[in-house]
Amino acid sequence: MDTFRALSARCAREAVEMLAAEPGAVLAAGCTDLLVRMKDGKVRPSAVISIDRAADMWPIEDTGRTLWVGAGCTHADISRSPLVAEKAPLLAAASAAVGSPQIRNRGTLGGNIATASPAGDTIPALVAMDARIVVEGLAGQRAIEVGQFFLGPGKSALGSSEVIVGVEIPCDEPGDVWAFRKLGGRRAMSIAIASVAVHAHLERGVLSRVAVALGSVAPVVVRARMLEAALEGRRVTAELLAEVCPLAQEAASPITDIRGSREYRLAMVEALAYQALYAAVWPDEVSEPRAKWEAQAGEAQREHECCRHGRPGPSPAEASDADGARGPCQSASESQKAETLGGDSDSIRVHVVVFGELACRVEKADMTLDLPRGSTVADLYRHIGLADSSYVMALVNHRREFDDKLLSDGDEIALMHPVGGG
Ligand SMILES: Cc1cc2nc3c(=O)[nH]c(=O)nc-3n(C[C@H](O)[C@H](O)[C@H](O)COP(=O)(O)OP(=O)(O)OC[C@H]3O[C@@H](n4cnc5c(N)ncnc54)[C@H](O)[C@@H]3O)c2cc1C
């Protein structure tokens, strides 16, 4: 790394003046992005102006109809803030998806915005919420609509001696719904291969003010306008979502890179749009039943009862004469009895077929499993030993589903590597 002068600004104004006085200088907030680029020699500043002590960029404030989030807030500050959780929960969810605890403790909202990466996690959330980015320059402050701020990968409307001081986000109103979905190469420390942020208003089952923002599938974060229009004013059902979500692809123009192919990104952006909209409209279905079930059953009992890795359920023939033996998997005949008796059985039976290379990683490519009621797609991966696989795509009853989708009795599940990816 080249040598550079280290400066420290006590407030945004001082940072602006320092930047104006030294054109070769750069700002440094959490340094999670800047240091990497300096080490790679992509940025060679004559001076680095630290703004991590500029306390005027820390506040998170309810200003009435909008929430103000200072650019110096870290992702950890934002994801833990009760005010953000109440007024702009979509931003809290997006911030919680950034990197790892270490990155979230250092990395700031301002740094994420200034980097202007189409893969920046907070950006789809800001776009879906119609935020305004407030910047300060020598002439004072100006607010830029988020849709006009990003001009291309790494390019933005930020002037050379301007500092991002914060964002203004319209506060959520009763009936507003939201969700953020991100697909990365792994669960943490992963830059998005594709991401989707949804923000909308839901009243009596009808969607309005629908905003679906797509990350990592175009030079800048884009709105899926055709998909939004197809949902506007419509009574939302899972069938409608499945019908219109292919429209998400219309807004995407992804590239093939080390993280995923163009085809893979197109397929995934549709899947993520479906997942995000589903989770926004039916959040309880995605999270609560599982939480309730876990609270009742307890994790220990759940571990005891669940099917172990690669252990296939009995075949229909085995099931028909399986009177006794009960291993960790409940026998198929017993669960059938429980269902037939109309009781509320603690288990469900699903049929799983594993395709392609993935089939080599499980004991049987075609199996019937009895799983504890409340199991999700992710639980299924764990049961059969696929939890560590980077990419498994689940089709549940012929529809792409997401990891936290609750499984139901009788589900037909196909597991495969997604087309063209990973
Ligand atoms: C291992 C690792 C994992 C990561 N994972 C993710 C991830 O999952 N999701 C994600 O979105 N990002 C991720 N990042 C990228 C990075 O951590 C985030 O973009 C972070 O928000 C950057 O903030 P920072 O404060 O560290 O910015 P810095 O590194 O301090 O600065 C980045 C750029 O922004 C400019 N800048 C900073 N603050 C301001 C300001 N207030 N006004 C104007 N310009 C400013 C700087 O001059 C610099 O050019 C990851 C990075 C690493 C190293």
Image (cartoon, rainbow, N blue to C red):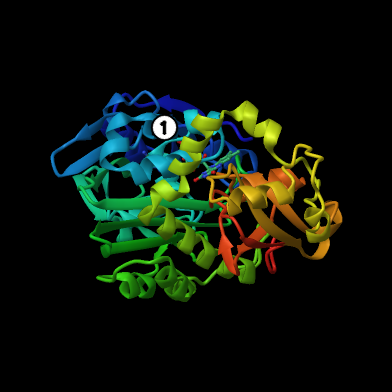
On the image, the x and y values in percent for residue 148 come to 31, 61
In the image, taking residue 50 as reference, residue 207 lies left or right, namely left
At 35% from the left edge and 51% from the top edge, which residue is drawn? 178
Residue drawn at (74%, 56%) of the image: 368
Label 1 residue SS:
loop
Residue under label 1, please give it. Answer: 74
Does any atom of ligand 1 lie closer than 8 Å to the CB of label 1? yes
- Place of residue 139 in the rendered image (x, y in percent of width and height, measured from the top left): 19, 45
User: Is the residue 192 above or below the residue 19 in the image?
Assistant: below
Amino acid type shown at disc 1? Thr
Residue located at (80% from left, 50% from top): 312
**Residue at position x 42%, y 68% from top?**
241
Q: Quadrant of residue 16?
A: top left
Q: Is residue 14 above or below residue 253?
A: above
From this viewpoint, is residue 369 visible? yes
Q: Is residue 185 visible?
A: no
**Is residue 56 or residue 232 the one in the foreground?**
232
> In front here: 233 or 143?
233
